[in-house]
Amino acid sequence: MNLQTNSAGKSGLCQADMTLAQKGKTFHWARHLMGSLHASRATRLYSFCRHIDDLADESSSPELGSAALVLAAQDITRGTSDHPVIQDGIDLMRECAIERSIVLELISGVASDLGVVLIPDENALLRYCYQVAGTVGLMMCRVLDTQDSSALPYAVDLGIAMQLTNICRDIAADAQTGRRYIPQSMLGDLAPQALICPVEALRPALFRCVAALLDRADVYYRSAELGLPYLPLGARSGILVAARTYQAIGAQLRQRDYAYWTGRAIVRKPQKAVVTARALLTVPLHRAFWRCPRSHDDTLHAPLGGLMGFERLSRPGHGV
């Protein structure tokens, strides 16, 4: 029986590793700096969260996607599932004391992507980023054995920063599926289709919007790095490299003068190697890599009140 269980676990981890290699190249690169336990947990977490995301993105209709997410939420609430990836996620939640409410908030955020998406303002955008990525940061803290609740706001910041980078990179691809994440308050009430290959007259405004969102992402990246000392050393290096590599996507967009429609910004292996070497050779020389910050800038989270999981960031010990 134990042999069967171990075999199933290895098979599941292998599948999760394949998912990470195909769909999460940045984390696949960075997780090699982690110890084996943290690397395997992080890989399983990515597979689980990616599966939740794919329930919406790969559904043939919003109705079917919504039904699939409802079933996933019911399984998570019940604590058991017939789907192997969901069940492994539930097992990981128990193993690492991940709050159920955080996972349910992730599902709520993913569900909001079904159908046409028109983000009204920057606060709504930040709330969305928390739901689909800040929650993942909270879960990552747990799988990396970060016990100090003071680390959690910084994990949220990294998730928000990465999601803002994603949004800037994928404006055209998202617009093709009826999603406009650039807030109406920044750009006006444009239909998503207008962003796929924008007309010349629209481009200056788009340049300003993408630049502003990438600048906002950099504020959250800087805050996130202040929280690195809360992590175990190997995990600290892995998360640093993941953050810097993701941030390099924004740097590529800047080099293209924010013309996202000319092709998807990709950080290839030679550039990843440069980013990794630079991060590991310079950041540990600074005291901030070793000493926890005095306090978090809570103004970064002003729009997030009332979201599940967020209100209890400062209350450790709440498991599944």
Image (cartoon, rainbow, N blue to C red):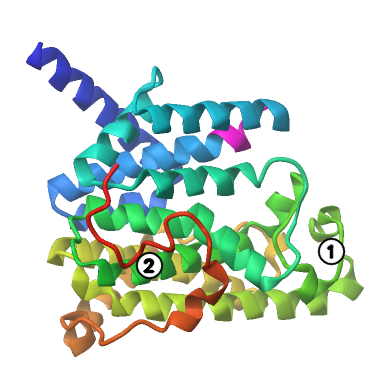
Where, by quadrant of the figure, is residue 58 drawn? top right
Given residues 220 and 310, the one toward you in this image is 310
Residue 185 location, quadrant: bottom right
- Whole-percent x and y of residue 115? 75, 41
Q: Seen from this angle, which residue lies furthest left?
A: 2
Residue 198 badge? 1
What residue lies at 30% left-to-right and 39% top-to-bottom?
Answer: 44
Residue 272 horizontal/vertical position (percent):
37, 64
Q: 222 or 211: nearer the eye?
A: 222
Query: Which mark is on residue 35?
Result: none
Residue at the image point whose x is 20% and y is 75% from the top: 229
Q: Is residue 194 above or below residue 229?
A: above
101 shown above or below 145: above
Q: Nearer the viewer, mark 1 or mark 2?
A: 2
Question: What distance separates the C-alpha of mark 1 from that of mark 2?
Answer: 30 Å
First reached walking from the N terminus: tag 1 or tag 2 = 1
Magenta segment? 55-60
